[in-house]
Amino acid sequence: MSVGPARTRSAAFFIQYLALLAAAVVWVQFDFVRRRVGGNLGLFYLLIGASVCYIGIRAYLVLGRGVARRWGWLWLSLDLAIITCAVYLTGGLNSEAALAYFWPISTSSIQRLPRRTTAVGGASALLYLAATWQNHASEKYLGTIVARMAVLIVVTSLAIYYALTETALIEELGRLREKVALADYRSRLSREMHDGIQHYLADIALRLELARSLIASEPAQAARMAVDQRFAVRQAAAELRYLVRLLHSPSVEREGFADALRHHLSVFAESSSISASLKIEGEVRTLPSDVAHAAFRIAQEAMMNAEKHAAASEVEVTACFGADSFRCTIKDNGVGFDPAALPKAAGAKGGFGLASMEQRAESVGGELRVSSAPGQGTEVDFTAPVSRVAEVVQRGA
């Protein structure tokens, strides 16, 4: 499974990390740095070599194996340890390597993690004190360290403020998207009522009125016409059940995506007589509200299409929780269709809701792929990037 932009960002991070290590090798060649390093030059090169090996292993685990994000604290601890060793080996209080402490602080801030930003800022200050403690006898030590600690505190405070502000903006954006999705949902429900149950009820009323007018002259034909409306009544009842399921969908925000989808599958299977199963891959975690809502509505629409149009007997839903992305696949064993001919066949009905599903996917920066062929069933695949905002919201930041 491709994780798209998230994977690209991770690869760029590792390239930057290696570039920083290469710059450190060049930096240590300057005479003013070598005088401070003294006999620690061999240890410094050993640190650089160990750091390169560490980055290689980390890149393999993150990019190749897709390890869980809970390893982030381990990576961060190792990063801070490398910086601290570099400061100690290259002059302590006077080492320019101390500027690298701002890197993990800014990274945590950009990830919109206020608590982590605070922790990294505090840890950086303590580690810097530890790495420069050999200079404590210097008369300039106290004044210099106080000034640098003040700068570190100010920078950390600004980073925390940025993280808190960005988190609030993301949450507000999620609420706005929810409102837009609700408006779209109401509009779609109105269209479904107009094109579905209202059509059947109007047809039933027209034919019963015609049967009433024929009672006197042709009672037998009038009776047949009235009896024949049983099929239309059943269709109207099916449309009504469909709308009721739309209206009584469980709350994704309250129950969580996995539990809400599992509940909906149970109700869907019971009311439609279609076998429905859910497969979970990866570690279940809280999704951003807009991604969870979009995924749930896409799954709901795909299942309704399997019931209304595909004549399917089985529907399988797979939810994959990745490190940087979320994927939901809905597959049925129905009659399938030719995607190339769908616009002409669907006409004004919007391609069995495909346009609505595509809009939902695009609204969260995701992608929707529909694969189908006559007699081969249909597979709807939704993929969306997932950032650390989900954990921020879950922990209350």
Image: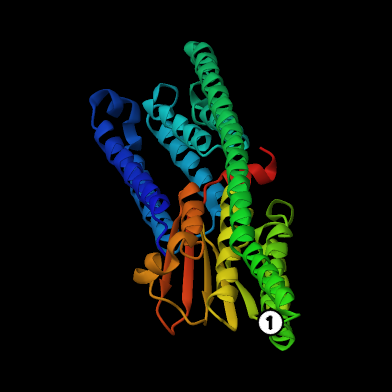
Report the front residue among 329 and 25.
329
Which residue is rendered at x = 40% and y = 79% of the image? 373
Which residue is rendered at x = 54% and y = 19% of the image? 154
Which residue is rendered at x = 49% and y = 35% of the image? 110
Colour logic: rainbow
Image check: 345 left or right of 118? left
Label 1 sits on residue: 225
Report the front residue among 40 and 389.
389
Report the front residue among 267 and 100.
267
Q: Given the current orientation, which residue lies at the most extreme front position?
A: 217
Q: Quadrant of the N terminus?
A: bottom left
Q: Residue 82: image x %, image y %?
A: 44, 41
Which residue is rendered at x = 46% and y = 49% of the image? 365
Q: Residue 375: image x %, image y %?
A: 44, 85
Q: Residue 391: image x %, image y %?
A: 62, 47
Image check: 395 left or right of 103? right
Image check: 174 left or right of 2? right
Q: Quadrant of the C terminus?
A: top right
Res 230 quadrant in image: bottom right
Q: Residues within 10 Å of mark 1 (few under 14, many from 20)?
A: some
